[in-house]
Image (tube, rainbow, N blue to C red):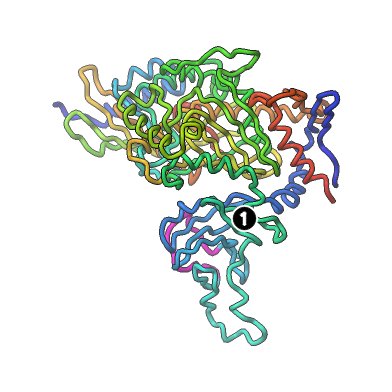
Amino acid sequence: MPRSYIIDDTERKRFLLDREALVSSAVLQEEMAKIFAKCWIYAGHSSELKKPNDFVTRKVAGRPVIFNRDARGDIHCFLNTCRHRGAIVCTEREGSRRSFRCVYHGWAYRNDGVLGIVPGAEAYKGEFDTKTLGLKTPARFESYRDFWFLNLDANAPDLRDYLGRARDYIDLVLDQSPSGEMEIVAGTQEYDVAANWKLMVENSVDDYHLPSTHATWLNYMANSGVKIERPSEGRVLPTKGLAIDLGNGHFTTDNINFRGRPVAAWIPIYGEEAKPEMAEIRRELVERLGPERARRVADTNRNLIIFPNLVINDGSSVTVRTFFPDGPAKMHVTAWALGPVEESEAARARRLDAFLTFYGPGGFATPDDVEALELVQQGLANWQDDRWTEMSRGMGREDEQLNSDEHHLRIFWRRWNQMMDVA
Amino acid sequence: MPEVTRSEVEDLLYREAALLDEWRLEEWLDLLTDDASYYVPPNDHPEGDHHKTLFILADDIVRIRERVKRLMSPDCHAEYPHSRTRRLIGNVRILAVEGDLITVAANFVCHRYRRYERIRQYTGGYRYIVKRADTGLKIHERRVFIDAHELGSLGSLSFIL
């Protein structure tokens, strides 16, 4: 039923969220229809399909899909289900195939989706026509700079328009590559979190939690020789960061970096031997982009959210992370590393090592995020008796919004609420 | 160089398992060489190279020691209070001996319990490179292959597997 889940009182500077939004199966069912079936949902990256006939299979918004290149090299997304009785037609995780053959009755599809073989086709006498029985595709499938998204709503706006101002930040991430091309690195991190999927959206951009949740990571950084300044001017973080509204429910943090960046901001963990190459990377950035843009690429970091569930963290390394609900209190997270296609073996190794200092199920930070989100979900069992989540931090701040405020979390929840509050 | 026996290797592995299960991590560090490394490759590319493949975990000795500091801190929220773990190790085999380096394979099951949580059962294989030192056998490299297709419900690897 359409209804509002937020109290958004700009006069009293209070923002409250009804915790039912985080625990209810009915809410999840509505989300699948009103959000996951209406928004552009990240499906994959061109670089995962290096050659013609390459494919990967995965679930996107609960739908098993095949993401592949056909024999000519064109990229597709097909629903991984046989038009005959519905079985999965591609059971492998990744590989190279010219056709997908259903094991049940042997219907076989070319990798451009066309139904090629129906054993005993002469038994069909009526209007049966293999031309109408190719693999189904999502209603829409479009890309921006190698990031491919599907949309289950044929009437959705174009992807470019949907991304809107978020494109500027995708461009900024990709500017760390001289060619403007980055690739997904082999090796996938897939882990479940026993928490509502929207808590991962919040956690991915909420820098307020960093000093408390990630105290051991900060210690590790300090032990390795990273200088961590004491927060000043009433802030909670070592450096200043902003939260920026990008429209359409997208938003990002935009922070002065203190933690090192494999693209050109050296910290001792990278080793003395990395210094000359990193100086050269910085020189190239300045030459290609000018000093101001180069500074943003090298010396600022950002966590970008493409509504509803794509996160690009351009911090200690670059991670592409997406997550889907599996019930109201559980999500599946998938995360990859992204790197410039032309980077040297040494730079790639540094990027991957830096990734593991913070991110992922074995990192020095992510496990504590997972713990925090699971503790929230466990605590929410009290939701009926303690109904409202407090999210007013920074509200009414006249000038810019900080990354440690909750402005960007409110952007998410306002958009979410607006989409849910329709018949 | 005297020949290494399987029971010598087993003694090392069993001692390590006990120290890890009992959270005696400082003592566990004493089982490692000064240039030891610890790897958990991603479930979808178990034979990958950590310089080219995103791993779950790839520690040199410096980071192993930092990891132990983290794990023993009450601020390590994912492991405070500590998980209770119990690991069973079997099928220990010596695969190769080259100079003072001995390559060892073993199977493991590790059960992990936390309050309010489901039981998590990690199964897989260990591959060790063990080094013969004056003081006995030490662990030069430990590599953990998790059988699951994805970490999935096993969640974080916040402890030492």
User: Which residue is labeled 1 in the image?
Assistant: A150
Where is residue B60? Give x, y as percent: 35, 26
Magenta span contains residue A95: yes
Q: Nearer the viewer, residue B69 or A411?
A: A411
Q: Amino acid at mark 1?
A: Leu
Q: Measured along the vertical axis of the image, is residue B32 above or below residue A151?
A: above
Q: Nearer the viewer, residue B107 or A394?
A: A394
Quadrant in the picture for residue B108: top left
Residue A216 seen in this snapshot: yes
Q: Nearer the viewer, residue A396 or A372?
A: A396
Quadrant in the picture for residue A177: top left
Q: Measured along the vertical axis of the image, is residue A98 above or below residue B14?
A: below
Q: Residue at x 59, y 19 (%)?
A: A237
Q: Residue at x 62, y 52 (%)?
A: A160
Where is residue A52? Give x, y as percent: 42, 63
Left or right of B154: which side holds A94? Answer: left
Left or right of A314: which side holds A345? Answer: left
The span shown in magenta is: A89-104
Magenta span contains residue A418: no
Q: Residue at x 60, y 85 (%)?
A: A123
Q: Chain of mark 1?
A: A
Look at the numbered disc 1 and give the secondary structure of its residue: strand
Where is residue A152? Give x, y as percent: 68, 57
Where is residue A336? Give x, y as percent: 49, 42
Magenta stretch, main secondary structure, is: loop
Q: Residue at x 82, y 29 (%)?
A: A387
